[in-house]
Amino acid sequence: QVQLVESGGGLVQAGGSLRLSCAPSERTFSPYAMGWLRQAPGKEREFVAAIRWSDGNAYYGDSVKGRFTISRDNAKNTVSLQMNNLKSEDTAVYYCAAGIISGQVMTPRSVGAWGQGTQVTVSS
């Protein structure tokens, strides 16, 4: 089964920016969609953003619209998440995911492959 390898994350002050990247272990991997979900302590895993591989259409969770941008690099087969104007409530473990977009979201149940997760901490 393909593995998703994440990079980026870390500690940043509120208002700052971070960039996450994710690459599949198999270069020939061709997903329907890839995205990011996050999970804060004591909360359920929630949808952040996803991008459909065929046409590049992107979708975002309400809490990150206008601040986060998801993009894909077809040549490198990677997906990235640029996070700007970070807030303390963005603090969570961020997971790269490959799955299906339904109703403009990628839910945990529609994910077929997960990354190991990377911590993003925003200090206020």
Image: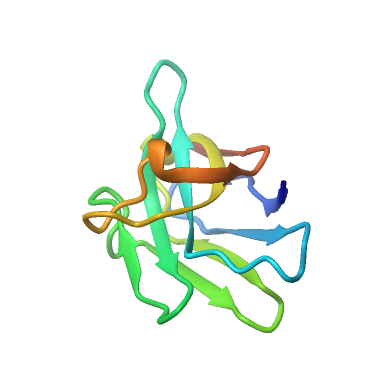
Q: Is residue 61 above or below residue 44?
A: below
Q: Residue furthest front?
A: 1
Residue 85: tell me if it is visible.
Answer: no
- Nearer-the-camera pick, 82 or 55: 55
Q: Is residue 113 above or below residue 100?
A: above
Q: Is residue 115 above or below residue 103?
A: above
Residue 42 is drawn in which quadrant? Answer: top left
Indicate the position of residue 113 as horizontal and vertical percent values.
59, 45
Indicate the position of residue 111 as horizontal and vertical percent values.
47, 44
- Nearer-the-camera pick, 3 or 6: 3
Residue 65: tell me if it is visible.
Answer: yes
Indicate the position of residue 9 as horizontal and vertical percent values.
64, 48
Q: Residue shown at 72%/46% (left/top)? A: 1
- Nearer-the-camera pick, 13 or 53: 53
Indicate the position of residue 36 as horizontal and vertical percent values.
48, 50
For the rendered model, the colour scheme is rainbow
Q: Is residue 114 above or below residue 102?
A: above
Residue 16 as seen in the image, left or right of residue 3: left
Q: Residue shown at 54%/41% (left/top)? A: 94
Q: Residue shown at 71%/51% (left/top)? A: 2
How many dots with numbers? 0
Which image quarter holds the C terminus?
A: top left
Residue 22 as seen in the image, left or right of residue 27: left
Q: Residue shown at 49%/34% (left/top)? A: 92
Residue 54 is drawn in which quadrant? Answer: bottom left
